[in-house]
Amino acid sequence: MVEKVKANCNYSGRVVEGPTNPIVTPLLTDLYQFTMAYAYWKANKHQERAVFDLYFRKNPFGGEYTVFAGLEECIRLIANFKFTEDDISFIRESLPGSCEDGFFDYLRGLDCSEVEVYAIAEGSVVFPKVPLLRIEGPIAVAQLLETPLVNLINFASLVATNAARHRFVAGKSKSLLEFGLRRAQGPDGGISASKYCYLGGFDATSNVAAGRLFGIPLRGTHSHAFVSSYMSPDEIIDKSLQSADGSSSCEDFVSSVQTWINKIQCSNSLRGIFGETNQSELAAFTSYALAFPRSFLALVDTYDVMRSGIPNFCAVALALNDLGYKAAGIRLDSGDLAYLSCEARKFFGAIEKEFGVPGFGKMGITASNDLNEETLDALNKQGHEVDSYGIGTYLVTCYAQAALGCVFKLVEINNQPRIKLSEDVSKVSIPCKKRSYRLYGREGYPLVDIMTGENEPSPKVGERILCRHPFNESKRAYVVPQQVEELLKCYWPGSSDKPREDLPPLKDIRDSCIKQLERMRPDHMRKLNPTPYKVSVSAKLYDFIHFLWLNEAPVGELQ
Amino acid sequence: MVEKVKANCNYSGRVVEGPTNPIVTPLLTDLYQFTMAYAYWKANKHQERAVFDLYFRKNPFGGEYTVFAGLEECIRLIANFKFTEDDISFIRESLPGSCEDGFFDYLRGLDCSEVEVYAIAEGSVVFPKVPLLRIEGPIAVAQLLETPLVNLINFASLVATNAARHRFVAGKSKSLLEFGLRRAQGPDGGISASKYCYLGGFDATSNVAAGRLFGIPLRGTHSHAFVSSYMSPDEIIDKSLQSADGSSSCEDFVSSVQTWINKIQCSNSLRGIFGETNQSELAAFTSYALAFPRSFLALVDTYDVMRSGIPNFCAVALALNDLGYKAAGIRLDSGDLAYLSCEARKFFGAIEKEFGVPGFGKMGITASNDLNEETLDALNKQGHEVDSYGIGTYLVTCYAQAALGCVFKLVEINNQPRIKLSEDVSKVSIPCKKRSYRLYGREGYPLVDIMTGENEPSPKVGERILCRHPFNESKRAYVVPQQVEELLKCYWPGSSDKPREDLPPLKDIRDSCIKQLERMRPDHMRKLNPTPYKVSVSAKLYDFIHFLWLNEAPVGELQ
């Protein structure tokens, strides 16, 4: 089975715990990282100091922004990076028998004390080509980190972005619940989705394990199976319910519900909407209310929403109301959610009026059933009365685009800048160990991200600076920043004594993410034809990129 | 952090280990499973015997078949299903404060000894609506299992199916390598993908952790960063290489490579194809060959495949050949893979002829770079010389369809059949505790799956039986089966003494999966417009479904 690395490293005076998922170990990498490490070791090149950038090339979901997530898990891996003897035996078995013993001794002593990690703060709004992480260290160990770091960031950032996009369409006032565990890509696809959807702006999850691991609020009520597991109210044996204030007790809550269903059926304003309601359903609702009188929320679409679910719900809610309890609301899980939510709202309003129950018209309405950005958008266009959305499959599997293409590219070795060429310009890497900055304009919006060489002076507030597109010579602009924010900060200084950033709690990351999203210029964020945010390089870096490119690229010969 | 349930249950005389991923615990479920469990317990209904079917409604990827996977992990969860005190404290915190203590005592004693699990063999070819698992047990515990079981089967079956589809397009003779870890949906999205792609017919993975956990063959060589980390062959210090048989030694392998690159440049048949090759690349290849002389495989597209990568590779391979080593081949990771593989093959053939190196023309060619079913199909149509494919993103994230919609539906409680209705006929569940059979025809192909009531006589070889579409009354057919296979077998008998199926090793599941896929009638398997495989119910079950349906559905009133 998976062994968990127990040793926790001391980091900034605090212990950095191991990765949340114990299967995240230094073996969670590609075999070629070990074959390369061996080749480097064999050539005595393994200690050469390399700089790698981790970045993505294109924003997901047809949008123009991405939420960066996964950093804490990366640092947890790095802080606890150590091979066990069992790991080393397995690596030895997996490599050719000719590999020398010294290499395995080297692995035995390996950790990340010579590695430095610079990163953008988790939960930041980020853009293509700008490094999310810069990893500096001996080339062999930096390479070993490639696969797990990319893995830990790719899905985290993708699903956090998806959550942020759902929030954008749903609007601030709605409650967003992540209900995706059962459809997620495996157990920790589910747990990661719960974590990073919360980070990206969701309010709660149904996933109990995630709630426990990360302190995310939990939500949930009952399923269709619960409803159909009942046959009739006669099944209910213990029918008594104390009033909310404990002052009195209703001996036969089942009869009280029955009285209410009759009243609703005979009411003038509601007459004719329904006949006999489903008795299995009424029994299930009554039983559920007896168990949770203070938080009664019912799934109303097992049989027929308007002819059975809603009247049954109202009867139970009114019986609860007699005892001083306030029902929480209904969930709709099928059908035309816009229409049904409006009809339900009307019905609740009629109940409020007819029976004089203040606030009944504002009863909570939750909608679920294969929701995604498009369906939320369609609901908004049609008009609806939904207060919260339970979103699963499309959210957690990132159905609209199931992968983000983060890459990890060598940009410098032994202080020599390196470039990765490609016939596809979008795949050419930006060489050199770099700094990056976000420049803000007069209205407080971020205007442009700019990358510079490590030793260039930083952009200054109020000073004009030329920002160039890294590959398109005609695209450039002068900017006079009103605020300059350096993006990469040191999250793992190795054994150096550089100042280091704290890893904030998830709740704080979520708050800062929401704040940053709100600070963006609206045209970058809109769903339809958003404006690309500008990513640039300094004039000096531009010139150097193109010098290196020409230097490395072979000159073609047309034949 | 995550606690691992240490207790392993005894099962069929063997210990069943816990789930591969320690985050799979009884808390990996939706909150509403606990609220329902509480409501059942409060109504003293929690021990009522329920039967749930786990099935999916539609084959993924526009195909007409699915590979069933994930069963072993389900049984591991069930065999070790037990709440810790910490779990129980957390559940208590997560439920309303009014929940009674007795419920938590109940949870404390809970395990799956009263549960029985019947399932189709893992690795089987399966079809919509036919139960993959049938779970029988006290309703509260069966409900708690819903979320983790659906989670463990959904992605496993989806990605195994995706792998099988890739194998179908690639053909039997090609080597298929799963390279997706970095782009997978989180760490165990990657590990699960590696496991289930192997199950579905892949040959190897790059994922070291998966190789170790499941014994999957590992594959991998080097990356572009390895190539660009070198500057020139002068960097190489230790230049000596022993011959393959140990009889002699080459003191300056770097020079030997240089000699070969010159010979290739001056050769008549190859003249004019290239000029100066890239020296970083030549250095990297030479260094890699010194580390792995018996398995030299080079990534040849860092600079220019035909003008640099291939000649450099050949020079190193020929220098190795002088010492009795046989190079393994090349990997292409960009560009027009069909064209480049053919050009590379020609070049290898020319080398074989020019320098008299037998077998050089058959040098292995691996292709990678965003491959999927469509690109494999396109390569086949264009003609290519690729021997193995390295497939990542599209395979492991199931990019074409990121989720399979497995559901878990109550079909019986207290021996009373239950049906889940829906306005959408495809969502109506098939009630009753059922048996299912696969009927084979004269040519050995499976003809139809049929579900019957638990107590109906089983279909018999040579006896005509009527197979009805469950919901379409006009679709029915008589079948005279030549072979009858009962699909559901007991994998978890709880504390009963029923005979139980073994959980076979992954390799055996893979073999039986490949065999089953080959046994299917080809028109069900083809990519374009495949014929749906027939799924049916017995005449008796058909009548009962429709009786129950009419009984439960409310009669509409048009107004």
Image (cartoon, coloured by chain):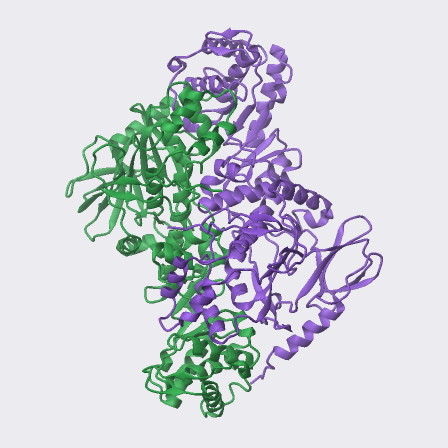
Chain colours: A green, B purple
Instruction: Place residue A219 in its image quadrant.
Output: bottom left
- Above or below — where is B255 with respect to A171? above
Percent position (x, y) of residue B366?
A: 56, 29
- Above or below — where is B438 with respect to B374? below
Percent position (x, y) of residue B529?
A: 67, 51
| Residue sitting nearer the eye, B190 or B262 | B190
Q: Residue at x 42, y 19 (%)?
A: A42
**Residue B188 visible in this rendered orientation of the protein:** yes
| Residue sitting nearer the eye, A398 or B140 | B140
Q: Residue at x 20, y 53 (%)?
A: A443
**Residue A423 visible in this rendered orientation of the protein:** no
Q: Residue at x 27, y 34 (%)?
A: A494
Total number of numbered discs in the rendering: 0
- Above or below — where is A117 with respect to B66? above
- Relative horizontal placement of residue A356, taking residue B487 as reference (left or right): left
Instruction: Place residue A220 in its image quadrant.
Output: bottom left
Residue ranking furthest to the right: B462
Instruction: Place residue A373 in its image quadrant.
Output: bottom left
- Relative horizontal placement of residue A198, taking residue B452 as reference (left or right): left
- Above or below — where is A389 with respect to A66? below
Residue ranking furthest to the left: A462
Percent position (x, y) of residue A503?
A: 27, 46
Percent position (x, y) of residue B227?
A: 43, 24
| Residue sitting nearer the eye, B244 or B75 | B75
- Relative horizontal placement of residue B204, taking residue A468 as reference (left or right): right
| Residue sitting nearer the eye, A56 or B128 | B128
